[in-house]
Image: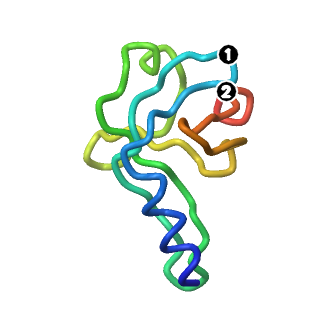
Amino acid sequence: MEDDKKYSKHLMDKTVVTKSGKKFGVVGNINFETRTGELMQIILKNPTSYIDQLDIEQDKNGNWCVPFSAVIAVGDFVVVSEDDIV
């Protein structure tokens, strides 16, 4: 569980992009299942206008939520699969 905390902190403020290089925004926060520690969603900050064209879930505060299951790679960027989002 401690490794998950380090891992989630590592994701903060990374740019979120698609496989084709389209920018979604920046990791602003992460929702996780408190019982298991499983990462559930990335909450975006500074979303780009590109994301407006997609059918992505928003939370009650209007923040864009990308399902963590769509993440395919983490390095300098968090890479997500658009196919797993829409």
Mark 2 vs 1: CB contact within 8 A: yes
Q: Pick whichever, 27 or 76, lies toward us.
A: 76
Instruction: Pinpoint residue 62: horizontal percent, then vertical percent.
Output: 29, 39
What is the quadrant of the C terminus in the image? top right
Instruction: Pinpoint residue 44: horizontal percent, then vertical percent.
Output: 38, 40
Look at label 1 and name its amino acid: Ser
Applied colour scheme: rainbow
Label whose residue precedes the other's in the sequence (2 or 1): 1
Instruction: Pinpoint residue 81: horizontal percent, then vertical percent.
Output: 70, 31
Of circles 2 and 1, which is in front?
Answer: 1
Location of residue 14 (image quadrant):
top left
What is the quadrant of the N terminus in the image? bottom right
- Report whether 52 appears left or right of 2: left
Q: Name which residue lies at 50% across and 68% down.
A: 32
Instruction: Quickly name the residue at label 1.
Output: 20
**Dot 2: what SS?**
helix
Q: Name which residue lies at 53% across and 42% down.
A: 66
Q: Pick whichever, 40 or 7, lies toward us.
A: 7
Instruction: Quickly name the residue at label 2.
Output: 82
Query: Up-down: is 35 above or below 60?
Result: below
User: What count of labels does the image hold?
Assistant: 2
**Dot 1: what SS?**
loop
Q: Residues within 10 Å of mark 2 (few under 14, many from 20)?
A: some
Location of residue 37 (image quadrant):
bottom right
Instruction: Pinpoint residue 61: horizontal percent, then vertical percent.
Output: 25, 46
Location of residue 76 (image quadrant):
top right
Q: Name which residue lies at 69% across and 42% down.
A: 73
Query: Up-down: is 37 above or below 82?
Result: below
- Report whether 73 appears left or right of 24: right
Look at label 2 and name its amino acid: Glu
Q: Name which residue lies at 62% across and 25% down.
A: 18
